[in-house]
Amino acid sequence: MDRYVWSWAACIYLRNHPVYGPLLGRASAAPLDYSMKLSEEFEKSLSARWDWVERDWKLFVDDFDFGYQPESNLVAIEDVAQGIRESGLSEFTLDTDCAKGWQLARCYLKAGEQVEIHAQGTYVVRSANQEAWESSPDGITYEYHRRMPLGKLLGGFVSTDTSAPLEVFGVGKQAVYEAQRDGWLLFRVNEPVGQRLDNSGTLQVRGRITSSRPR
């Protein structure tokens, strides 16, 4: 069963990905070849960017659950992330849409660097019985998801090392994060993916790299 489920998850991921979806479409165009040739040709088309396939897959798997909507939750970071790494920026601002999944900040951290994060804003994380549930970046302690308050701002760190797992940490109104490896920061609000569709509003996330390590 696990192999069957993960195979369909991979189909959803690849079919809806803005970069890999067209490649899959070309590989699976009629007439279909039911031998291993199709898979081999598709894998070959992805070989040069396989590290990015793995990074986006980790973000997909973290959020994949009942009610998953690819158009608002599937993340493709390759093109933007490479530009961020080359930019050498030490500060960033991100208007985080609370109805969407992981969103990439313009922040590249090297191992040992710290980033000081501040967030502000009020947004609706759920409408129940025609009553809006408003949240701040610290979330609503009336309900919890994955052991953190509903609506709390979360941070995610994707490493250049593809063997490293996605790191997810609580941010709230402010936090300091220290990178153990080189990589990129992302943000989203804490809520089951199938319940984010009725969210509205944004919160502003600001960050500044505070370490003195030369960039």
Image (tube, grey):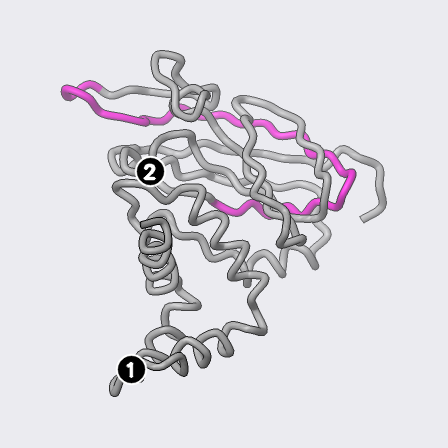
- The residue indicated by pointer 1 is 29
Was residue 128 drawn as part of the magenta stretch in this picture?
yes
Q: Which of the 4 image quadrants contains residue 209?
A: top right
* Eye-nearest disc, 1 or 2: 1
Q: Closer to the camera, 98 or 76?
A: 76
Task: Kindly identify the residue that appears in the image at 42 percent across and 19 percent down.
Answer: 149
Q: Position of residue 122 (x, y in %)?
A: 39, 24
Q: Closer to the camera, 84 or 43?
A: 43
Identity of the residue furthest to the front in this view: 1
Q: Amino acid at mark 2?
A: Val
**Residue bounds of the magenta highlight:** 103-131
Task: Kindly identify the residue that appears in the image at 30 percent across and 35 percent down.
Answer: 196
Q: Is residue 169 above or below residue 148?
A: below
Label disc, if present, on residue 8 of the rendered structure: none
Q: Dot 2 lies on which element?
A: helix
Q: Is residue 212 above or below residue 150?
A: below
Was residue 148 drawn as part of the magenta stretch in this picture?
no
Q: Is residue 63 above or below residue 139?
A: below
Q: Is residue 118 above or below residue 91?
A: above
1 and 2 marks in contact (CB < 8 Å): no
Q: Position of residue 48 (x, y in %)?
A: 58, 73
Dot 2, how many residues are within 10 Å of its Cα: few (below 14), some (14-19), or many (20+)?
many
- The residue indicated by pointer 2 is 193
Q: Amino acid at mark 1?
A: Ala
Q: Main secondary structure of the magenta part?
A: strand
Q: Position of residue 50 (x, y in %)?
A: 56, 66
